[in-house]
Image: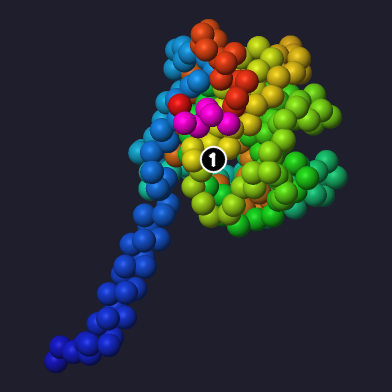
Amino acid sequence: MATKIRPMKMQILVLSLVIISLACVSAYADEPNQLTPIMVQPGDIHLSMNFDKDFVVKRGHKFFAAGQGTNWEAKDGVLVGTQSTPEYQAKKKASGKGHLGTAPRLQFPNTPKDVIVKYSFKIVGGNKTKLLPMIEAGHHLRRIYFGAKGSTLLVDHEKTSIAESDFVLQPNQWYHVMLEIKDNDFLVRFQDGPTIYGNHPGVGADFADYNLGITATNKGTMYIDNMTIWHAGDVVSDWKDTKAKPASAEAR
């Protein structure tokens, strides 16, 4: 005999399906990243990926390197990063060398020195530390750090702050960001959010590499979508006027 579903149970079932559907949708960036460069002209594309095909970031991957044993996998249309395995952490802890991989860390080999980076991201869970989460271009060379009380552009192994903002990254929220780096100029913009700009010789300093690095919170999960990296071309003609009033950049 077929089981009858009472009206109240039917309503609960429908509501549950709606909640599940919304949860699945939230894994994707909720809107497109509409930011365009305002400081430099985009040159050749170094990398463009929307993660519509599933893959796992393993050692020797063509485009990505999973830092400190963390796990990265493209699935359901986004790139997802989680902390390293308990076994990896135990091994590192026993060695006494640190770098346990508790914060998802992704690196991009052969990133150009002068670069434009555009992507969307979300961080779920975990805890902020004195240096995480962050985005950097060159390990400890030029970095934006998202702290509990604001955000800071840092150079020279985090010894020098070149710009500060009261912008606080919120958990479980999609952000659309663009970085532009050219010579000594470092510009970070968020769609419907702040513009943070700094100029310092440390931005253009010579370094072993300028690889892009993205790190989440400690023991958090990071989602990345719709990423494009360009070689940075010439400075746009009206940049001097724009940087004099960077708050207006979001309206451009």
Q: Which segment is the magenta one?
A: 247-251
Q: How many marks?
A: 1
Q: Quadrant where the N terminus lies? A: bottom left
| Residue visible at 75% across and 41% down in the picture | 131
Q: Main secondary structure of the magenta part?
A: helix
> Residue 9 location, x and y as percent?
28, 86
Q: Using a 10 Å C-alpha cutoff, classify the residue at mark 1 as few (fewer than 14 neighbours), some (14 to 19) or many (20 or more).
A: few
Q: Nearer the viewer, residue 201 or 27?
A: 201
Q: Is residue 196 magenta?
A: no
| Residue visible at 51% across and 8% down in the picture | 237
Q: Is residue 250 magenta?
A: yes
| Residue visible at 36% across and 65% down in the picture | 20
Left or right: 101 in relation to 43: right
Looking at the image, residue 96 lies above or below residue 5: above
> Residue 227 location, x and y as percent?
46, 31
Secondary structure, mark 1, is loop
Question: Is residue 90 visible in the rendered structure shown here?
Answer: yes
Looking at the image, residue 52 lies above or below residue 197: below
| Residue visible at 75% across and 18% down in the picture | 200
> Residue 180 location, x and y as percent?
57, 22
Res 8 → quadrant: bottom left
Question: Is residue 59 visible in the rendered structure shown here?
Answer: no
Q: Quadrant where the C terminus lies? A: top left
Looking at the image, residue 43 lies above or below residue 86: above
Left or right: 37 in relation to 147: left
Left or right: 186 in relation to 74: right
Left or right: 194 in relation to 91: left
Q: Which residue is mark 1?
A: 193
